[in-house]
Image: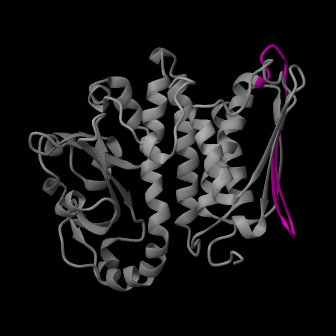
Amino acid sequence: MSSEEKPSGIDQVLETPDLGVALESDWFKQFVDQIPVAIAISELSPKESVVFVNVEFERVTGKELSFLVGEGWTRVGGNAAPPQEPRSLGQAVVDEQDFVGVFVIPREGIPVMVDVWSNVIEGNGGTPVFRLVALVENAGAVASVVDGLEERVREKDTQLRELQHRVKNNLQMITALIRMEARGISDRSTGEGFDRLAGRIEALGLLYHALTQEGGGDTVDLGVYLSEIASAVMRAHAVEGIRLDLKVDTWPVSIDVAMPAGLVANELLTNALKHAFVGREGGTITLHSTSQPTGCRVLIADDGVGLPEAAAWPKPGKLSALIVRSLLQNAKAQIDVQSTPGDGMCVTIDFACEDAAPAADAQP
C-alpha cells in the first residue's frame, strides 16, 4: 500500500485484492495453515463450492480436504445448538453474515460444539466473489455433556448477544490484515511481511483467549493483556543483549479499547526489536501500563537509534495509522510520540477511566 493511499475506515481496509491468486500460491496456504483458527473459503460463482480449507478446519470438522473441496457447505454437517431455531450449519453460513451462531457438528461420531463466523469477500467492483467461514471449537462440549448443551447455551446467550457486535470484528480484522499486508509485500521470499502479520494475528488470538476465559465478560485486563503480547513478541524476535523493562498494573478496559491498544503495542515492540538496535550490541525496551484514579498510561520506549530525520510514526497510509486512529476514537486517547535520531523513541498513550471502561461501567 503506497503512502498516497489513505484509508478512511474499515470499509476501505476490507477492500479485496485478487484472493484467487493468493489461494493458488503455496506460501499463502502454508501461512494460513499456521493460523490457530479453522478457516475455509468458498468461491461463489458459477456455483458456490469450497476451494480451500486449512489444517485446523480439517481437525475441527474431522473431514479431510479432499472430502470438502469442490462441494457445498452442507458437506461440513452440523446443526444449530439449542435453544436456537433448528437449522443446518451449511445453510446458516450462506444466509447470514458475521457471527452466525453456535453449532454442533459430528466428528468421528462424537458431537463437537463450535462457534461459527461467515464473511463475504467482495472483488474490486463490489461483487461478492468468495465466502470465508471460521470455526472456533468450544472446549466445553464433549459427548458426556451433550445433554446439557441447552442449559449451557442459555446461560451464555445474554453474554454472547452483548459480545457479538464486538467479537465479529475479529474475523473482519484478520481478513483486513491479510489483505493489506499482501499489498505491501514486494519480496515474498523474505517472509518479513507475513512474520509481522503473524504477530498481529497472535495479538488478536490472545484477546480472543481473554474473552473466552470463565467470567471474562466484555472486559479485558489491559495490563495482563499487554504483558502477554510483550512476552509473545520477545519470544518471536528474541535478540541477544536486548532486555525488556516491563511494569503493568491491573486495569479493566472494554474490548474496543483493548484490541487497538494491543495491536499498537505489538507494532511498536516488533519495530523496536527489528530496527531500533541496528549496529548496537544491545539496549532496553520499556513497556509500562500504569493506572491512576483518573486513568491509565501506556508507555512504550526504547533507547535505540530512533527514527530517521523527517520520519514519523505511524506512517500515513499504513495499517499502523489506521490502528492508532481506531485507538484514539474508541478510547478518546491522547498519544504523544517523541524520537531523536540516535537517542531512541518513546510513545505515550493516556486514557481517561470513563472513556476506556466497559459500556456498563462508563460514565454518562
Q: Residue 332: percent from the left, percent from the top?
A: 71, 58
- At 70% across and 51% down in the image, what residue appears? 226
Residue 271, given in percent of the width and then of the height, sits at: 70, 30
Residue 273 percent across, percent down from the top left: 73, 29
Residue situated furthest left in the rendering? 47
Residue drawn at 20 percent across, 57 percent down: 94
Q: Position of residue 219 (x, y in %)?
A: 63, 69
144 left or right of 170?
Answer: left
Task: Give residue 251's quadrant in the image.
Answer: bottom right
Q: Is residue 275 left or right of residue 77?
A: right
What colour scheme governs how the chains and residues are painted in the rendered image of this protein?
A: one colour
Q: Residue at x 16, y 41 (%)?
A: 69
Q: Nearer the viewer, residue 81 or 263?
A: 263
Is residue 288 on the magenta stretch?
A: yes
Above or below, 45 against 79 in this view is above
Q: Is residue 37 above or below residue 81?
A: above
Q: Is residue 147 toward the left or the right of residue 320 in the image?
A: left
Q: Is residue 294 above or below residue 182?
A: below
The part of the image, by quadrant, that contains residue 279 is: top right
Q: Count all numbered tags in the image, as a single digit.
A: 0
- Of the 4 image quadrants, the one containing the C terminus is bottom right
What residue appears at the point 56 percent right and 73 percent down from the top-left corner? Answer: 214
The one of 286 and 12 positioned closer to us in this rendering: 12
Majority secondary structure of magenta residues: strand
For the record, the magenta segment spans 276-299
The answer to if 329 sits in the magenta stretch is no
- Name the residue furthest right: 343
Choose top left, top right, bottom left or bottom right for residue 263: top right
